[in-house]
Image (tube, rainbow, N blue to C red):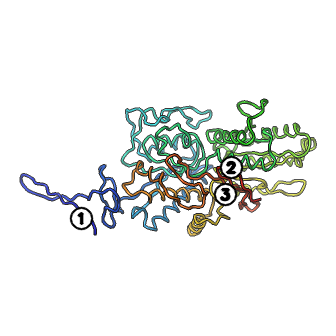
Amino acid sequence: MGKLFVVPVLMLVSACSTEFTSLPCAVDSDCDHGAVCELRAAQPVCVQAADAPIIIGQSSPFTGSNQALGVGMKLGIQLAFDEQNAAGGIRGRQLKLVIRDDGYDPLQAEANARVLVNAQPSNAPPRCPNTATPVSNGALPPVMVPVSTTALERGPDAVLAMLGNVGTPTAVRAAPVAIEAGTLFFGAFTGATTLLRDTSAGPCAQYIFNVRASYGQEARATMEYFLNRGVTDYRALISFDQNDTFGNAGYSGLVAAYVAERGEFPSQADPTTPIARFRYTRNDVNSVPVAAVATEAYLASLLQTFPNGTVGVGIMMTDTYGASSTYIQHLRTWQYANDTQQTDLKKATRLVLHFSNVSFVGPNALAEELVSAGTVATPNGPMALTNDVAVSQVVPNYQTDLSDVVQRYNALVAADGAAPGFTSLEGYISARVFIGGLLNHQGPFTPEGLIKAFETLPDLELGIGANAGFSATNHQYSQSVWGTVIQPDGGFKDLYFWTVGSPIQFFQ
């Protein structure tokens, strides 16, 4: 039976009148059909579900050289939202996504976050220990500037959560705004440790939920892949990375992975940069050739250091698709160029390069660029520039995986008329996990109320690893990495599966 609305009668001096107020509630089931329990003037009352949409914000690059990443994440999130809305939403509430373009610029990402959480500066000291800590503003060289020296209050027009933000340098500036204002920062498209997976946010870390594996885990999987290919000497490892916090996350992960797998570096290794490192400038593909030339000089020195037989080299790439494609093309052209180094070093036949990009690269955009670039002439005939180019993925291969979540994604993206891809699949999976938390919560939707809902989320059976899930002590949903190799036609072949606590499993 439906609940009756309370009708208080107010006694006045000269007349009497009636005033209707909404029924108090604790959970949605306390309300009549078509109504849900939401906060109004800080009080939980029954309101019509149509008047209680769930507003989610996203700041990502939708223009510029890395726009494919933002567009892909938005596509996946929107597919999941549309799917849930068509099924009735969240007990009648509709999901709405508000996007803002940051162009992969850290300061714009911070500005967007302030708008999305309706941040209200106050005179009180910050609640989160990281808020006033100077962090990179994204410039080169970076200027270390705090996000705020005072607390930021969550305004009345704030989104419930920020979902699917793209990038590490952008998260460094945007995430502190969100969590200082008490807003969820969920499913960011980055595997960085800083702030998102460390203790620097103190108790405010409760507002951060990651879905994907970390860059440290991707580096560990990559290191095991290189070892499987015979790359055992630290001198045969190279890092090509973006010159900012994103690149630092990848490089630190590779160094830690080497130590975990091989032990401490020999005493003759550089104490600060034990693995050779070559860097490029964010959003500037023109800075890549300089890094490539320096890499080529290093490779030439390796061939001189190891004068006999083939020399296998593992190159971990913490980059984006435009920089990656340019770098690979440059190195391959040099490797097979008919020059004096070819005569002296026989680099075409002695050098074996294993490229492995982290997931953030934008796998599909990279594959398109390499396929478009074609081939390079070798002593054995034309070789596709996709040859031996791997990507460590944080979601299953949408071209081969048979799990329900991947099959559902493929059906939705096909119906939408869009091209499938790893980035949009990640957006879809992150949104599905987020929706699972919404469905697991029964009371008015607040960031604080959702924390427990995510921490007690039952197994969603998405097929992304047996150890997937959140808990009160773990705010990273997935702990798995899927290795893939780009094929000459731009497709992706399964290479390996890696997950925490288990040996790497190779498919080829």
Q: Residue at left 34%, top 56%? A: 38
Closer to viewer: mark 3 or mark 1:
1
The amino acid on which the numbered mark 3 sits, given as a three-letter code, is Asn
Cα–Cα span, label 2 and label 1: 61 Å
CB under 8 Å between callouts 3 and 1? no
In this figure, which residue is indicated by the disc labeled 2?
322
Q: Residue at left 44%, top 57%? A: 438
**Pointer 1 local density, CA inside 10 Å: few below 14, some 14–19, many at least 20:** few
Residue 227: percent from left, percent from top:
77, 47
Residue 60 visible in image: no
**Location of residue 3 by image quarter:** bottom left
The amino acid on which the numbered mark 1 sits, given as a three-letter code, is Leu
**Is 423 positioned to the left or the right of 324 in the image?**
left
In this figure, which residue is indicated by the disc labeled 3?
364
Cα–Cα span, label 2 and label 3: 11 Å
Looking at the rendered image, the quarter that the C terminus falls into is bottom right
Residue 304: percent from left, percent from top:
88, 37
CB under 8 Å between callouts 2 and 3? no
Which element type, helix, strand or loop, lies under badge 1? loop
**Is 444 positioned to the left or the right of 202 in the image?**
left
In this figure, which residue is indicated by the disc labeled 1?
4
Residue 158: percent from left, percent from top:
40, 48
The amino acid on which the numbered mark 2 sits, given as a three-letter code, is Gly
Nearest to the observer: residue 287 or residue 3: 3
Q: Residue at left 77%, top 30%? A: 267
